[in-house]
């Protein structure tokens, strides 16, 4: 697999506040990386650094020059009382592709409609965003990212505040994008149970262990107990792993 992002002794922070002193890890084309950690552990900081929105204070972050990022921000950050439709919300992303001074053309409209269809909300295209359910809003945000024609999809807590059914549906959608659209995925969450059956690789933001990438096969009850410093068991039901 081709390496597309590499952190080399990267120090990340904001002004005098250091979030990470030295990060060393790699992301390869086709990876589905789950970044797991509690609120305030630096998950969003890593995402911003992957995309180049936050530059390292020391060390290096090397990116493949052909990367095109699609960013799915936290749903709460895009909630709006303005009467934007799903189509309009998704079309907003095209300004980064065509430029702010150009009007969207036929190709842009087709790309927006394609993204809306892929995410399963074609029938909601003319609905106002603020009237949607949480799951429908999340699908709109994912469609917005897809409209940018990315090869690397970044998702910040995409299942937060969703009910169990909606969480599963969103994660299945993300997995299908990974497989069918051949997208590299980086997803952050504070719940390992949510991504253990979907992601291929994992990073745990726990200061007491080295920041490294774990393969899915390394996630045993013993290794997770060491990571989280509490007894953890893994059960398998209908082919799905459940952490208890």
Image (cartoon, rainbow, N blue to C red):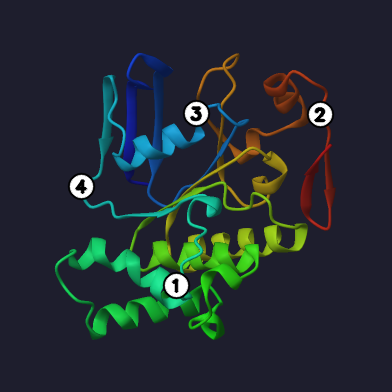
Tag 3: Cα neighbours inside 10 Å, few (<14), some, or many (≥20)? some
Q: Which quarter of the picture shows residue 27?
A: top left
Say which residue appears at 50% left-offset and 68% top-offset.
Answer: 140
Looking at the image, is mark 3 or mark 4 nearer the viewer? 3
The residue wearing badge 2 is 232
Say which residue appears at 83% left-offset and 58% top-offset.
Answer: 238
Q: Earlier in the sequence, mark 4 or mark 1?
A: 4
Q: CA distance from mark 4 to mark 1?
A: 34 Å
Q: CA distance from mark 2 to mark 3?
A: 24 Å
Q: CA distance from mark 3 to mark 4?
A: 25 Å
Nearest the viewer among 20 and 74 is 74
Q: Could you tell me residue 211's position as x and y percent? A: 50, 23
Looking at the image, is mark 1 or mark 2 nearer the viewer? 1
The residue wearing badge 3 is 42
The residue wearing badge 1 is 84
Nearest the viewer among 150 and 107 is 107
Looking at the image, is mark 4 or mark 1 nearer the viewer? 1
Q: Earlier in the sequence, mark 3 or mark 1?
A: 3
Vertical placement of residue 127 versus 30, above or below: below
19 horizontally vs 99: left or right: right
User: SS at mark 4?
Assistant: loop
Q: Could you tell me residue 58's position as x and y percent? A: 27, 17
132 horizontally vs 106: left or right: right
The residue wearing badge 4 is 65
């Amino acid at each position: 697999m081709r390496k597309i992002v590499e952190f080399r002794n990267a120090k990340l922070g904001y002004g005098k506040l250091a979030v990470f002193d030295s990060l060393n890890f790699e992301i390869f084309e086709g990876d589905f990386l789950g970044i797991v950690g509690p609120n305030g552990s630096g998950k969003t900081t890593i995402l911003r650094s992957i995309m180049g929105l936050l530059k390292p204070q020391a060390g290096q972050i090397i990116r493949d020059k052909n990367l095109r990022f699609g960013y799915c921000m936290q749903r709460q950050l895009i909630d709006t009382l303005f009467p934007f439709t799903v189509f309009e919300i998704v079309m907003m992303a095209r300004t980064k592709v065509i430029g702010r001074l150009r009007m969207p053309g036929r190709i842009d409209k087709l790309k927006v409609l394609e993204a809306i269809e892929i995410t399963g909300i074609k029938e909601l295209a003319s609905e106002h965003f603020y009237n949607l359910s949480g799951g429908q809003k999340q699908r709109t945000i994912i469609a917005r990212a897809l409209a940018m024609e990315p090869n690397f999809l970044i998702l910040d807590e995409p299942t937060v505040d969703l009910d169990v059914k909606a969480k599963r549906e969103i994660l299945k959608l993300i997995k299908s994008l990974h497989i069918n659209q051949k997208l590299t995925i980086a997803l952050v969450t504070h719940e390992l149970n949510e991504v253990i059956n979907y992601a291929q690789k994992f990073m745990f933001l726990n200061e007491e262990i080295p920041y490294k990438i774990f393969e899915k096969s390394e996630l045993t009850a013993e290794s997770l107990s060491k990571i989280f410093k509490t007894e953890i068991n893994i059960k398998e039901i209908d082919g799905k792993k459940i952490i208890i």
